[in-house]
Image (cartoon, coloured by chain):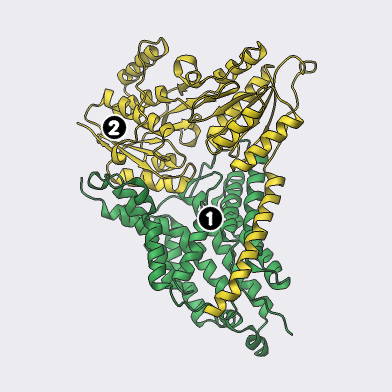
Amino acid sequence: MDFPILAVLAATFTIATPLVWAGLGAVINERAGILNLGIEGIMYAGAFVGFLTAASTGSLALGLTAAIVAGLAAGALMGLLTVTLGVNQHVAGIGTTLLLIAASEFTNRLLFSSGSQTITVKFDRILSGFFAQYPMTYVAFLLLAPALWWLLRSSGFGLRLRAVGENPEAADAAGIPVARTRYAALMLGSALMAVGGAFLTLSLLGSFTLDIVGGRGWICIALVIFGRWRVWPVVAGALLFGFTDALQLQLAITPFFSAVPNELMIAFPYLVVIAALAIWGRGVRYPGAYLTPYRRA
Amino acid sequence: MSRTTQRLFPRMLSGAALAVSAALLLAACGGTTGAETPSGDGAESEVPSVFGAFATPLEEPWDGAIHAALQSAEEDGLIRYEHVDNLHTADEMERALRDIISSEDPDIIFGDAFAAEEAVRAVAADFPDTAFAFGSGGEEQAPNFSVFDNWMQDPAYLAGMLAGGLTESGTIGVIGAMPIPEVNRIVNAFIAGAQETNPSATVTVSFINSFFDPATAKQAAEAAIAGGADVLFAERDGVIAAAEENGLPVFGMMVDQKEQSPEHVVSSLLWNMKPTVEAVVAAVAAGKFEASNLGEYSFMVNGGSSLAPINTGTAFEIPADLISQVEARSAEITDGTFETPVDEEAPAGSTTVEG
């Protein structure tokens, strides 16, 4: 059996897709000075709300829209907690994650008694061979990443966003509305996280089960540090993780490598990310106003 | 950098502490649901009362199967039934069990002890008058702690026979949770069945190291397909989506998963806890309950497991002589002339290449 390297590369992009959506959402949040640990719960809510809407209306477009709305709402909640009320961002984020997962599971139990639910339609892969990917994969790599790169680097909104993340006092003095900019960043970033979650239910699986996100949000938090809050390095990090994961899944069933202990193979992607963080993640410079609520004295 | 770290660290600590308390609060609000009211009036004093104490949410198929059997027993008027789920740490499980016994004093407690063996066994030892029947990889514990497990090697063998007959490439992909005895014996029986109908078949076995990660399970299935597999066994959720997309035959697990992909799910391995529940309830009602291993009540010969009806609406043809071969073997299992071998060793190196 020849080693199916093209299939591994194709799987790399599929595995990386939710990480790119949510990871870039986290970049936007953190460049505005806010660590959004609600990411895991926002992905979960996006997966659930998107699925629920698509299942009850039969429309994938409505499902995706609903996921985005859920993300915007979650971003507004994070804004209320961290910008308006100025509470500790770790607490606000983890609380948001717990709340959104519990609310999704509770609603799921009320609506569906048990087991996993399936929708009859889902986004199908387009093109064939190596290029057989889901539409949301193409959007992530060909539209989202370049657009955000330009947005953060060159647009007026991007400049204001980075200004409130680096030095909110100076931004305020320059007439930039700090709170409004941070709200906008949180809502935009959270919407992207929700789309990343909805990718799992609306594209990859066509079904919802508990625990569906499975820690992918936390991987994104690490990817953002690995990518030093920049768009393309974060995309590269997601691809690195996707590649090592796809590789270990393939090697595990390839006769020559099957003697390698299963646990080591499964740990492989995480070991690579930890090693990469250890090499490139040292001496990172956090955004200047990271974790700091802004109050005019 | 170092100044930032110094500022961050106490905040992270306080954040973690608050998160833990928030988690406890949420668990208290959302973790327990519905006590079911007794079905028939006047039956309360006659039928045994049963409490279900589950480590996972009921949506998880394993505890879902136990819960379904207990609900069904309640509908039959055999028991009164209440339950609590999501007791996912040993500490929570032990506290819940002691609470249940002191406030409800049920005759029987059903549950799963895998994640909390010592705690559950300690509670059982403290309350010898309560009958315990728990899913467990261990032995029974006198006088009142019985164990059961999903002994599904029989339907796994039959599904393997079908898979061996259906593969054209000669490669079958199995995606399982992790190499533990409960999973290994099902996977190994599946492989043995495939070898009966197709002695030269290769079976690749992927483990995702999680009981519940459908996205990764699907990627593992895609890897199996890239490696040549053209028939899949979904020991875990997520694999059926890959079979559907690639138009391949697939076997489901725990409940009949045919509706997830009506043209591709050939059959599913079903676990029926009803015989186990009935055996325990009958023993308690007769005052004869004692600790035992209830595993055999999950065997097909006792009605505890089965293969779901073979799908007649698949997109591919299932040869009639293959079906009759499987039906003949099924009859031999049911009448006791064939005993499916039980092998709990991990499938060698995650890959089994035969022939």
Q: Residue at x 31, y 23 (%)?
A: B319
Q: Is residue A131 visible?
A: no
Q: Is residue B153 visible?
A: yes
Q: Is residue A256 above or below residue A36?
A: above
Q: Residue at x 40, y 55 (%)?
A: A14
Q: Amino acid at mark 2?
A: Thr
> Regarding mark 2 in the picture, which secondary structure is present there?
loop
Q: Position of residue B46 (x, y in %)?
A: 74, 14
- Gap between marks 2 and 1 measured at Cα: 34 Å
> Regarding mark 1 in the picture, which secondary structure is present there?
helix
In this picture, residue B184 sits left or right of residue B37: left
Q: Position of residue A82 (x, y in %)?
A: 68, 70
Q: Colour of chain B?
A: yellow
> Which chain appears green?
A
Graded by Cα atoms within 10 Å as few (under 14), some (14 to 19) or many (20 or more), the crowding at tag 2 reads: many
Q: Position of residue A87 (x, y in %)?
A: 70, 69
Which mark identifies residue A197? 1
User: Mark 2 belongs to which subunit?
Assistant: B
Q: Position of residue B129 (x, y in %)?
A: 68, 21
- B14 or A6: nearer the eye? B14
| Quarter of the picture holding the C terminus of chain A | bottom right
| Quarter of the picture holding the N terminus of chain A | top left
In this picture, residue A50 sits left or right of residue A204: right
Q: Residue at x 63, y 46 (%)?
A: A105
Q: Is residue B319 above or below residue A38?
A: above
Look at mark 2 in the image and give the residue it sits on. Answer: B167
- A245 or B257: nearer the eye? A245
Marks 2 and 1 share the same chain:
no
User: Mark 1 belongs to which subunit?
Assistant: A
In this picture, residue A174 sits left or right of residue A229: right
